[in-house]
Image (cartoon, rainbow, N blue to C red):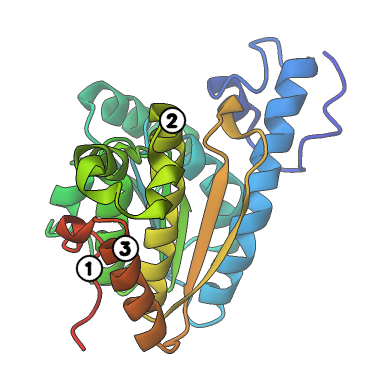
Amino acid sequence: MTKTYEIRPGQSLELLQELHILTREGKLNQDSRRKLKQVYHLFQFIEPLLLAVQQEHPDLSLVDHGAGKSYLGFILYDLFFKDQAPAGRIWGVETRDELVARSRELAERLGFPGMRFLNLSVADSIGSAALPPRIDVVTALHACDTATDDAIRFALEKKSRFIVLVPCCQAEVAATLRRNKGRALANPLAELWRHPIHTREFGSQVTNVLRCLQLEAHGYQVKVTELVGWEHSMKNELIIAEYKDAPRRVPAERLAEILKTLGLEELAGRFFVPAA
């Protein structure tokens, strides 16, 4: 067996094998070392948030939307909840039956009693009685279709203190820009998205800007950074929001002005802000 000095003491080797970070023989190769560094890199962003909540109450709660194989949830439970927050709970929300069943079986086998898995869409989870009325931390990494925005809506409904997003699927804004291009060409700014490749790239950028302004309009302080190398994805933007009851008027006004300037007024319901 090769050296495992890169692995944190007490971490479940069986879990790392299930996540294909360790081989079945318990070995680390170059690729798995890179994956392990990515896992720890992501954990470094989330651990301080968990500690901040834990200082207020021990039964912290986290919901991971679009959980897939619950890669993130299992790592967080193994590295933090298992020993430091045994009263805490993690819920993985996923629509695919087989992945939910697999995650439930793995959690039982590993002895992770604080993990729950729900076969729900993100939108349906907002009103689900299976989740408590308040959730401390909401995560959504590469949640597809409208799931990133549904996760934001979920977090706002649940009055979450922290929101962690690696945004995905910004096609709706790009499609709206494309559809309204003829009307918008009178505005010189339309040159930013006149060509199809620019429409896609600009639409992606605008989507995340609008998401940040929306969160700020709801009182969150927002930090945007890079999550380098996560799952080898080009979707590498990391948005971390903390509720601070911050001033809301200016970001709400700027969001509305951007929608108007770019001809995106029809998306005001998606990027909703509190009533003035």
Which residue is rendered at x = 21% and y = 89% of the image?
276
The residue furthest top is: 25
Q: Which mark is residue 261?
A: 3
With respect to residue 237, does 164 lie above or below? below
Image location (x, y in percent) of residue 128: 13, 56
The disc, 3 or 2, on the residue closer to the chain's N-terminal end is 2
Other residues around mark 1 within 10 Å, as few (<14) / some (14–19) / many (≥20): some
Q: Nearer the viewer, mark 2 or mark 1?
A: 1
**In this view of the protein, which residue sits in the foreground, 132 or 45?**
45
At mark 1, the secondary structure is: loop
Which residue is rendered at x = 70% and y = 45% of the image?
41
Which residue is rendered at x = 66% and y = 13% of the image?
23
Give the residue number, with chain letter if any, for mark 1: 272
**In this view of the protein, which residue sits in the foreground, 190 or 265?**
190
User: Is the C-beta separation of discs 3 and 1 under 8 Å?
Assistant: no
Q: Which mark is residue 109?
A: 2
Residue type at tag 3:
Thr
Q: Nearer the viewer, mark 3 or mark 2?
A: 3
In the drawing, does residue 203 fall left or right of residue 39? Answer: left
Give the CA distance from mark 2 to mark 1. Answer: 42 Å
At mark 3, the secondary structure is: helix
In the drawing, does residue 33 fall left or right of residue 49? Answer: right
Q: Which mark is residue 54?
A: none
The disc, 3 or 1, on the residue closer to the chain's N-terminal end is 3
Image location (x, y in percent) of residue 203: 38, 43
